[in-house]
Image (tube, coloured by chain):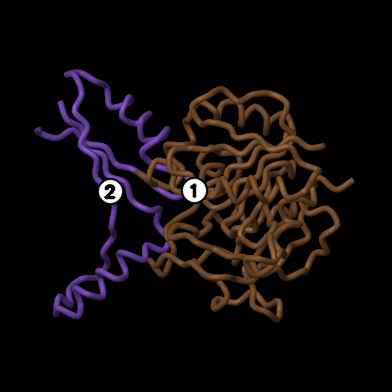
Amino acid sequence: MKNVGVVIFPGTNCDQETIRMYQSSDRFVVREIWYNDPLPTGFDLIFLPGGWSYGDTLRAGAIARFSKVMNGIIDHAKSGGLVIGVCNGFQILTEAGLLPGAIARNSSLRFRCEVVNCRVEPCNTPFFKGIKPGTVIPIPIAHGEGRYVADEKTLERMEAHGLVALRYCDTRNITSEKSNPNGSMRNIAGIVNREGNVLGMMPHPERRANPLVGGAEGLPLLTAWADA
Amino acid sequence: MTYEVRIFLKDGLLDPAAVTIERALKRLQFSEVDKLRTGKVFLIETPANTPKARVEEMCAKLLANPVMERFEIREVKA
């Protein structure tokens, strides 16, 4: 059994589908974690779900990043514990410095809410265990601030060390400007840290984790780490 | 005393709002607009003699994201 903690900030709104997704498998025990409490011990994975923590005031994730629970999450990550951040969770992880780069406003200035295709990259991480690099997975996005940016040196270092986890692409597996919904540099949709134990992505695999809502293709992205 | 903090996206990063506003100005015959940038302004009132370094700390820690933004600080008349 793997212990999963789902963090709830004021304004988080993707917590319940994330909890249901993990509860749909008997491999997981899921608990909610309140942002204003110290992080309890004993979790295999800490999950920062999507939403609008603190109403995206100042910058998405900028204030949530200093919540009480974050000290424990930073320690958990630094000691090799697994952390996933989706959408607002990804923004919080970059603001906290647990992932390189930053997330800016979509280049279209529009809030994009649709299903996009993402390609799994040859990435140095336990998260995508058993998922073949090059696999294209349809995943919903829902964000107005999702444009991944980093300086050229950081991008080169990330490519060299296999830290790009997901890229926006079309159905033929081609990463084009047209298939990039937010103007992210190099079509980056998801990344990991150097050690591979922290994963952040803008798309919402937890919204594509049950055939009832159109498909379950997203499920392995968030659960493969627990496979024996 | 009052400090004014101005925050801009770093040079070279696309500022899509600025591009849109720039286009609108040109459409209104303001053809002399070469470049327009958007930013955020904060007015911070502090006790007298608060060193500028404290405001720099505020910017580095919270107000700006140094990965994508740069900041300017100046003292202003309240």
Report the chain shown in purple: B
For this orientation, the residue located farthest to the front is A212
The image shows residue A22 at horizontal and vertical percentages of 70, 47
Label 2, label 1: how far apart the Cα atoms are: 27 Å
Quadrant assignment, res A120: bottom right
Quadrant placement of the N terminus of chain A: top right
Relative placement, left or right, of A50 versus A18 is left
Q: Amino acid at mark 2?
A: Lys
Q: Which residue is mark 1?
A: A13
Chain at numbered mark 1: A
A133 horizontally vs A170: left or right: right
Q: Position of residue A219 (x, y in %)?
A: 72, 57
Query: Dot 1: few (<14), some (14–19), or many (≥20) neighbours within 10 Å?
Result: some
Which residue is the site of mark 2?
B40
Residue found at the far left of this picture: B77
The local secondary structure at tag 2 comes to strand
Please, is residue B14 above or below residue A17 in the view?
below
Q: Residue at x 64, y 55 (%)?
A: A206
Residue depicted at 24% across the width and 20% down the height: B50
- Look at 21% across and 32% down and name the residue there: B3
Front disc: 2 or 1: 1
Snapshot quadrant of residue B27: bottom left
Q: Tell me whether marks 2 and 1 sit on the same chain.
A: no
Q: Quadrant of the C terminus of chain A?
A: top right
* Amino acid marked by disc 1: Asn
Q: Is residue B64 left or right of residue A90?
A: left
Chain under numbered label 2 = B
Quadrant of the image occupied by residue A5: top right
User: Residue A14 at x, y = what percent?
Assistant: 54, 50
Chain A shade? brown
- The numbered dot on residue B23 is none
